[in-house]
Image (tube, helix red, strand yellow):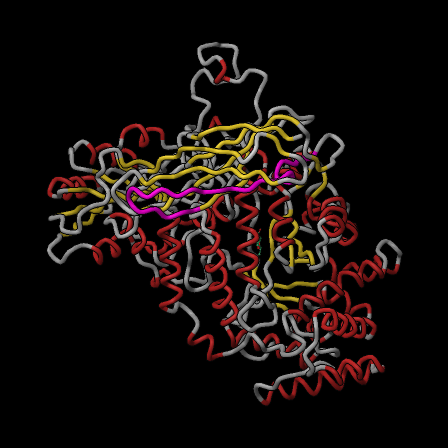
Amino acid sequence: MIALKSTNSKFTFYKIVFLSALLAISFHPLTAEVSAKCSEPVGQEAAKTKMNAFIDQLINSMTLEEKIGQLNQVGGSMADTGPINPVSAQGQEMKNGGVGAVLNIWGVDVVRNYQRFAVENSRLHIPLMFGLDVIHGMKTIFPIPLAQAASWNMTAIEKAERLAAVEATATGVNWVFAPMVDIARDPRWGRIAEGGGEDTYLSSQIAYARVKGFQGDDLSKNNTVAACAKHYVGYGAAIAGRDYNTVDMSLQLLHDVYLPPFKSAVDAGVATIMSAFNTLNGVPASGNSYLIRQVLKNEFGFYGFVDSDAGAILELMAHGYAADRADAGRLAINAGVDMDMGTGIYAGELAGLIKNGSVSEKTLDDAVRRILTVKYKLGLFDDPYRYCDKKKEKKDLLTAEHRTAAKDLARQSIVLLKNDQHILPISKNIRKIAVIGPLVDAKNDMLGCWSFTGDKKDAVSILDGIKSAVSPKTAVLYAKGCDVGSTSTGQFDDALKIAAEADLVVMAIGESGDMTGEAHSRADISIPGNQEELVRRIQATGKPLVILLANGRPLTIPWLAGNVSTLVETWFLGSEAGHAIADVLFGDYNPSGKLPVSFPVSVGQIPLYYSECSTGRPLAEDPGSIFRSRYIDSPNDALFPFGYGLSYTTFQYSNLKLSKPELTTDQTLEVSVDITNTGSRQGEEVAQLYIRDLCASVCQPVKVLKRFEKIALNPSETKTVTFRLQQEDLKFHNAEMKWVAEPGDFMIYVGGNSKEVLQASFKLL
Ligand code: BGC
């Protein structure tokens, strides 16, 4: 048997029952052999053999009901810190080995109680997994994922998830329903806040970093968690940005744009994947054998398990895809959904489906094996209470180190959109500053969506951040001015009064923290209520004015962009929001964020993304002509393009060079560019490289991001950045769905955003 470490007497009891039960049921020589070797250092292959032998043996000893139980994920109750009522339906189910995982509980006492009940009362004593939505931090809340993406800093993003895992595991959680890696090109969709934005390459890099951060290099450590890449797949392309809506797309778009972040998560070793709610080309993702069995498990080589999204198996009926519960269970498991989140359909229907031959026992065993393997890798068979350490719960949450990392990432997530009059940075010795707006003193909003494990009292508001940054002589005046969604002007006068007294006004406006996230799509993505009207009135005072935007999605802000001189995108930055924003306002940090998503001028342009294909009538060829692909009442371009963001210094790109004019299939093309800091402050810049395949058998986008690098430059310093491209980077899915690079001419674009670029060309031979 496997080596077991004892941490307390109750655990010793568990060890004994687990061991004796398993040995009594299914002892055979292999187990003895594995047991004899358990304390020896073993290579990876040997460890895998040992794991497989353990799991084989366990599966052989399971009844049909116990196997099905592993596939059943149930909602837990935070109230259950005492013994779970053994006669309750859930208690009975756990006793019968009928539960494999629990969701939505955390806290060492609660988790330990569930775990103890399951392992001590069920016949085979198989530990549970505990899954939770840890979307951007557990207690220390980091910026929302869309904001994190604006940092373009994979090291900082990985670190954020590392620390989120440290905190999650300190509360008993061993599985997180993150990262969300859905590409989102429609800002009406509220869940755009949870992902990496519109671009496939950037999102894929982020997916990799986030999985590595959560899972570390060894899942069995007591501070690493199983990650769950979601929502597989296409969920972000819901028609009209309405959550849960239908998705229809070409196979090329699916494979070239929406699937790569999932592939990247698989390459990073993600332990689980969540199947999505939406249909894709007519077949619901959670009953889609092509997507799950063929692409994910066979082509991508995903060996973890697939968990359905909450209730998604039941929803196969509402989609009009499954006739009844049994049909839904049959379709989901045959499609490759290994675990059922919350519907009880597998628990209720699988036995019958296996008996009548609609589902094979081999299919069931494969699902059980995948789930047990993740449990094994988490170290749960070694110690089911591995993640239940009261000492860690006391000391590992909201530490100074975690707050510093949250602040660091928050600063890097801020995007300076406009600073026309160089009002920023502000002197800390300013005499009087008026801080106005509904998001100024709004700790809860700073945490953003999916932050229910955080506590608003631990968040730093913008007001507190400003107060703690300025000199003791500076007077900070505050007025709310209006509420986020209200049309009342009742509080305007207070705001106008303090603006009149002050030397400078900072306003924080935008969305409330709960206007994005699941089921929070908006049809109108302008600034809600009377907030812009308040800006107009304050601006009329003539006082220097800085506008801070707080929001979880791109907003339509053409009036602000055209009329205010100073505009800063601050998203929802988490626990350290106020400090990070103050650092940017007063120049302790020079902003370096770049938009991971295009900001449209109007809702009418949506979906809007830089990586579009050319029409037969591109506007740029003849901007004055009527019969071009255009609007009669709006520009085509984004208000602020993908990749855009300013600094307190300026950067100049020059000397774009390619190492060769032609590339053969096995060569590397080096693309170098000089970047000079032409301003007077130290700063960081994200250099971006895009390509265009000028002529291909399937039309390719006008620009596709292929590389980026974030560099720091002192004033007057020049650095040469060299990017390397290979044939693999030029590939796409052709009409036969083959992954090919076609010979021909390519453009290279390099710059500080997707619009302002230097260009060169080469030929692929
Ligand atoms: C969401 C998932 C989430 C799950 C569990 C669902 O409604 O779509 O993203 O992980 O609930 O809370």
Which quadrant is home to the C terminus? Answer: top right
Of the pair 522 and 303, the residue shown nearer to us: 303
Which region is colored magenta? 710-733
Number of dots carrying numbers? 0
Question: Where does the N terminus fall, quadrant-wise?
Answer: bottom right
Q: Is residue 732 above or below residue 437?
A: above
Is 730 magenta? The answer is yes
| Residue at image location 55% in from the left, 56% down from the top | 178
Q: Quadrant of ligand 1?
A: bottom right
Q: Position of residue 104 (x, y in %)?
A: 55, 63
Q: Main secondary structure of the magenta part?
A: strand
Q: Nearer the viewer, residue 614 or 227?
A: 614
Residue plotted at (66% across, 50% down): 275
Q: Left or right of 389: which side holds 508?
A: left
Report whether residue 49 is seen: yes
**Closer to the camera in the image, 443 or 391:** 391
Specify whether 480 is left or right of 19.
Answer: left
Where, by quadrant of the figure, is residue 128 drawn?
A: bottom right
Q: Is residue 147 magenta?
A: no
Q: Compared to 477, does 395 lie above or below?
A: below
- Left/right placement of residue 553 relative to residue 727 reads left
In the image, farthest residue toward the right: 356
Residue 383: where, in percent of width, then height?
A: 63, 79
**Image quarter for residue 2?**
bottom right
Q: Quadrant of residue 216?
A: bottom right
Q: Is residue 77 visible?
A: no
Residue 480 x %, y %: 24, 46
735 lies left or right of 505: right
- x, y (%) of residue 318? 68, 44
